[in-house]
């Protein structure tokens, strides 16, 4: 049993063969495997995602994150000599002013101008302490930043995915709606539109919130003691309709099941800010959920398999329990489940 006071990042390490890191999504989306874990006993059942309804009950509520990923990776050239540059737009400060990651960074000094696809240019206006830059963009007539990115941008796939994604929509959920994420809420990638409709026909309710996923989700925990780790912040919105559906579900004895760690973090952030209650809310959250956390909303969690020593496996451990989580991951490796963004799914209930 893990001692909460002495929790170390290394406690959340597991050995993962490289060949289990999924490089491409499965077809169809819901053909991915599903490892179901009983939250109380730790008992494991092996299934497929298209059988999700077998583990749900009429009156259960799935809470999904409808954020949509920006195709925010762009490739261009330095205006004065044509040398290569790569930008990744991280955070919008104003309409045409963005915080960016870029490489090679040595080319991106203050005042340097770059051109992208003949439809936009950017000038570096500031170099930040962490090495990120502030860039001000200028667009060709007829474009805004989003239409330009849609035309020339690539999906900001995580660094462990090395194969090119042929269809941009495969890194979006079928219900994505609110543009603003730097990474996909990957637990939702397994749903098809037909499956969502079938779930509703069987009495499973669906509610939506928005949390724009930041690149910090991939940032490793570098501190030896996890309590020394500083979380990144992400913006969320939860509507009155969704708040009502959650409260009605609780009152009627149904279960609130978060689809993904992003939905989980939003729900528990709102509850923490409102004395355990779910209300309509908007704000930024830097909530860090690790073993010992007391959940106020969640009754179940759908999630992918996460990186070793990440804040996400710590969150799962908080909900399922440390020993059960590490056993589930050990089993998933032994059974050759597919891991990370395009990988298989886990249901904890």
Image (cartoon, grey):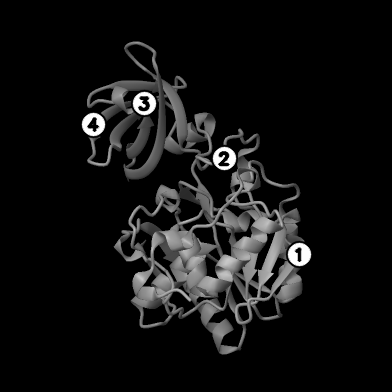
Discs 3, 1 touching: Cβ within 8 Å: no
Where 255 sits versus 10, above or below? below
Residue shown at the point (23%, 24%) measured from the top left: 111
Task: Specify which label sits upstream in the sequence, 1 or 2.
Answer: 1
Task: Specify which label sits upstream in the sequence, 2 or 3.
Answer: 3
Secondary element type, mark 4: strand
Discs 3, 4 touching: Cβ within 8 Å: no
Q: Residue furthest top?
A: 81
Q: Quadrant of residue 168?
A: top right
Discs 4, 2 touching: Cβ within 8 Å: no
Task: Specify which label sits upstream in the sequence, 3 or 4.
Answer: 3
Question: Where residue 188 appears, x then y in whole percent?
Answer: 61, 58
Discs 1, 2 touching: Cβ within 8 Å: no
**Can you see residue 256?**
yes
Reading the image, the residue beneath label 2 is 161
Secondary element type, mark 3: loop
Reading the image, the residue beneath label 4 is 125
Task: Specify which label sits upstream in the sequence, 1 or 4.
Answer: 1
Reading the image, the residue beneath label 1 is 47
- 138 vs 16, nearest the viewer: 16
Crowd class of label 3 (few under 14; some 14 to 19; many from 20; radius 10 Å): few
Mark 3 vs mark 4: in front:
3
Task: Specify which label sits upstream in the sequence, 3 or 1.
Answer: 1
Secondary element type, mark 1: strand
- 97 vs 309, nearest the viewer: 309
Residue 289 as seen in the image, left or right of residue 112 = right
Residue shown at the point (52%, 76%) measured from the top left: 298
């Amino acid at each position: 049993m893990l001692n909460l006071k002495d929790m170390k990042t290394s406690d959340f390490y597991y050995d993962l063969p490289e060949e289990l890191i999924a490089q491409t999504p499965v077809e169809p989306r819901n053909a991915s495997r599903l490892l179901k874990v009983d939250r109380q006993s730790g008992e494991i059942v092996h299934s497929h995602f298209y059988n999700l309804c077998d583990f749900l009950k009429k009156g259960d509520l799935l809470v999904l994150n409808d954020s949509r990923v920006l195709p925010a990776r762009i490739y261009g050239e330095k205006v004065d000599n044509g040398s290569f540059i790569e930008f990744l737009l991280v955070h919008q400060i104003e309409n045409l002013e963005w915080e960016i990651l870029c490489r090679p960074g040595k080319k991106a000094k203050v005042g340097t101008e770059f051109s992208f696809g003949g439809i936009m240019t950017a000038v570096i206006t500031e170099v930040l302490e962490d090495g990120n830059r502030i860039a001000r963009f200028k667009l060709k007539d007829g474009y805004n930043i989003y239409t330009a990115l849609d035309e020339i941008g690539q999906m900001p796939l995580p660094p462990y995915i090395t194969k090119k994604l042929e269809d941009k929509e495969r890194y979006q959920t079928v219900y994505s709606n609110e543009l603003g994420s730097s990474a996909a809420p990957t637990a939702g990638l397994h749903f098809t539109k037909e499956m969502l409709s079938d779930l509703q026909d069987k009495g499973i309710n669906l509610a939506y919130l928005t949390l724009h996923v930041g690149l910090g989700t991939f940032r490793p925990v570098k501190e030896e003691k996890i309590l020394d780790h500083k979380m990144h912040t992400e913006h969320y919105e939860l509507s009155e309709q969704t708040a009502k559906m959650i409260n009605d579900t609780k009152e009627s004895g149904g279960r609130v099941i978060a689809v993904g760690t992003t939905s989980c973090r939003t729900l528990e952030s709102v509850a923490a800010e409102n004395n355990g209650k779910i209300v309509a809310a908007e704000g930024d959250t830097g909530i860090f959920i690790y073993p010992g956390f007391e959940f106020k909303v969640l009754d179940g969690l759908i999630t992918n398999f996460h990186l070793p020593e990440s804040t996400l496996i710590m969150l799962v451990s908080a909900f399922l329990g440390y020993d059960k989580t590490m056993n589930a991951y050990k089993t998933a490796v032994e059974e050759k489940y597919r891991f990370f963004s395009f990988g298989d799914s886990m249901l904890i209930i």
